Image (tube, grey):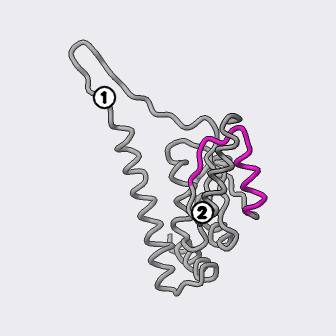
Amino acid sequence: QDDWRYTLVAATMLCQSKTAYEADMEAAGELKDFFRFNPYFARQIFEEQPINVQDMYNRMEYRPLEGFVFAVSPFNFTAIAANRPTSPAMVGNTVVWKPASASIYSSYYVMKLLQEAGLPDGVINFVPGSGGVVGPAAMNHSMLAGIHFTGSTATFNEMWRTVAQNAGNY
């Protein structure tokens, strides 16, 4: 829908300081690519099955993680920010989405778009806020099952340490 395209492009221009041309290519074009490619690749994974032999039927069953995925998105790309929570949700996972503090505005409109498209409440949980507050709360939670992250090496290393220290609690 054109209205959402304009909204996402405008939010990206304001939030990530991109030109209209850059924002349209990224927030509209690249985001559409993610929304097309991710289901395509998920379907390929789900369709892949072990070989069956005479008198023996083998089947692989895929299921979501037992817990939530903590999706932490970057400050500079609306499409990548949207991909962090939606790709794990597309394969059945519950997601806690913490956008970068500098991209809350554009991420908010991505969340509104997903809700208008029919995303059920509770599948992707939008939790904007300080990384120093939201991150520890998510990573110290016993139901953390995965992390989908794009950001700095320093932040990744801190997250890695926190998860390693809590490995026995998950």
User: Does residue 1 sit above or below 87 in this rendering?
Assistant: below
Quick one: label 2, few (<14), some, or many (20+) residues within 10 Å? Answer: many
Q: Earlier in the sequence, mark 1 or mark 2?
A: 1
Which is more toward the observer, 79 or 110? 79
Instruction: Compute the Cα span from label 1 to label 2.
Output: 35 Å
In the rendered image, the residue lying farthest to the top is 55
Q: Magenta span has 138?
A: yes
Q: What number is the disc on residue 103?
A: none
Q: Residue at x 63, y 82 (%)?
A: 14
User: Does residue 69 sit above or below 1 in this rendering?
Assistant: above
Please name the residue that numbered disc 2 is placed on.
73
Give left or right: position of 20 versus 163: left
Q: Which amino acid does label 2 sit on?
A: Ser
Location of residue 17 in the rendering, given as x and y in whole percent from the top left corner: 59, 84
Q: Tell me whether circle 1 and circle 2 mark residues in contact (CB < 8 Å).
A: no
Q: What residue type is labelled 1?
A: Pro
Element carrying mark 2: loop
Q: Which residue is drawn at 48% across and 72% down?
A: 28
Magenta stretch in the rendered image: 131-148
Please name the residue that numbered disc 1 is placed on.
50
Q: Where the C terminus falls, by quadrant?
A: top right
Give left or right: position of 97 versus 137: left
Give left or right: position of 157 versus 34: right
Location of residue 42 in the rendering, given as x and y in whole percent from the top left corner: 41, 46
Q: Residue at x 61, y 54 (%)?
A: 71
